[in-house]
Amino acid sequence: MAQKLWEKNVQVDKEVEAFTVGKDREMDLYLAKYDVLGSMAHITMLESIGLLSGQELEQLRAELKKIYHLADQGKFIIEEGVEDVHSQVELMLTRSLGDIGKKIHSGRSRNDQVLLDLKLFTRTQIREIVELSYELFSVLLSQSTRYKDILLPGYTHLQVAMPSSFGLWFGAYAESLADDMQLMQAAYKICNRNPLGSAAGYGSSFPLNRQMTTDLLGFDSMNYNVVYAQMGRGKMERTVAFALAGIAATLSKLAFDACMFNSQNFGFIKLPDEFTTGSSIMPHKKNPDVFELTRAKCNKIQALPQQITLITNNLPSGYFRDLQIIKEVFLPTFDELKECLQMVTYMMKEVEVNKQILDDPKYALLFSVEEVNRLVLEGVPFRDAYKQVGLAIEAGEFTPDKQVNHTHEGSIGNLCNDHISMFMQNIIDSFSFEEVIEAEKRLIQ
């Protein structure tokens, strides 16, 4: 059985070991590839300050590349009795290279290793979330332009209110995603700072070159203060979780609209039959299960920031094992949100729009405000015009003019989709993902 990195002569109680390790081995599989990347940068720096020879560096790099490709192909495993990904990588190196493998941990702790792994993993996941969000954004904006002239009812208090349009409906969710990307951009900037070299949270007596590892890994900067670097555990995850929750909130609201608009009582949109599921006893049913599951999953994701807050909010500075539990709620969330983004994008591409919604006379009163405004434009004081139309409605004498003429920015007749597109593109461009991708490629080549 492999010895723990910290173990000396006393072996820990088996039940205590099982409880303290928990799901860490399972969760660390998410981090394996990134642990190797961090080790590659770290040993390059160790060689530069004389703690490894050039030959040792090359031997370690060759073995780490093999482990990286194993992890990249999903073949990396953490063996029974091995605590975590850090221990497994060091064990594999020591089996291959003997004592050279034991030198890899000089100048760092598992504390700053996991801090680094989490940041490297998270910034990759953020990039994938941003790419998928942009795909959905593009579909929504395209559908907004395609159906810009198709009217549908707008509601307040779930009461028929004023004319809206599919141009507005699709475009509103596109712009919401753009704002979500602004929040994600802030989270990315907090994530993309290097904690490596902070060790257990108090630095090292080795003359580490932290700027070198920062550059090698493509970080914007380092977390300078070593105590603050350790304090970032939990803070980074919570900040990113808020950004994930923002996207989830947009998807959840869209999913609710889609479920409601797809129902027979509304009939505004229709999903292709192959996108719906049936009932075991009602042969006519075509259920929008994808949107219902999206709503539930995204509502669950919106609880993530609170979960992380409740794990961390009564901890003083320094490392505590409580922080391990964050992995269990944080790491799997990215896959869940990515799946929701992919499915909603797929559905929004294929959704069918009802082009005759407002032919139904029950929507006649949608146009009451239009009539009030027409009278005002003819010189009638607004309050008098409001009363005149209200009395006509009460008397059953209101006849709607269904011509809508909205011209101001962001309205039915002037969607500003080109401005929304430019707004989103500027946010996407400012992430500068290419620099990180290139830095990681250089490390593993």
Image (cartoon, rainbow, N blue to C red):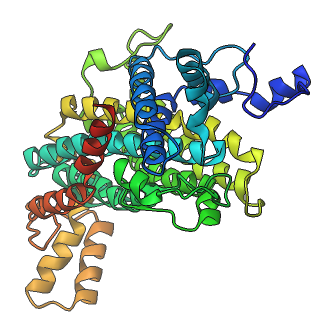
In this rendering, the answer to whether 400 lies above or below 18 is below
- The residue lying at 49 percent from left, 46 percent from top is 46
Q: Estimate the x, y position of residue 12 in percent, counting from the top left.
A: 89, 26
In this orientation, does residue 86 appear? yes
In this orientation, which residue lies closer to the viewer: 387 or 412? 412
In this rendering, the answer to whether 88 lies above or below 440 is above
In this orientation, which residue lies closer to the viewer: 94 or 163? 94
Residue 178 relative to residue 194: left or right: left
- The residue lying at 60 percent from left, 48 percent from top is 107
Q: Estimate the x, y position of residue 234 in percent, counting from the top left.
A: 62, 53
Residue 167 relative to residue 193: left or right: left
Q: Which quarter of the figure is the N terminus placed in?
A: top right
Q: Estimate the x, y position of residue 252 in percent, counting from the top left.
A: 44, 44
Quadrant position of residue 178:
bottom left
In this rendering, the answer to whether 207 lies above or below 51 is below
In this orientation, which residue lies closer to the viewer: 158 or 383? 158
Q: Which quarter of the figure is the C terminus placed in?
A: top left
Quadrant position of residue 316:
bottom right
Q: Estimate the x, y position of residue 85 in percent, counting from the top left.
A: 59, 28
Residue 66 relative to residue 7: left or right: left
- The residue lying at 17 percent from left, 72 percent from top is 371
In this rendering, the answer to whether 286 lies above or below 380 is above
Quadrant position of residue 11:
top right
In this orientation, which residue lies closer to the viewer: 428 or 340? 428
In this orientation, does residue 160 appear? no
> How many numbered callouts?
0
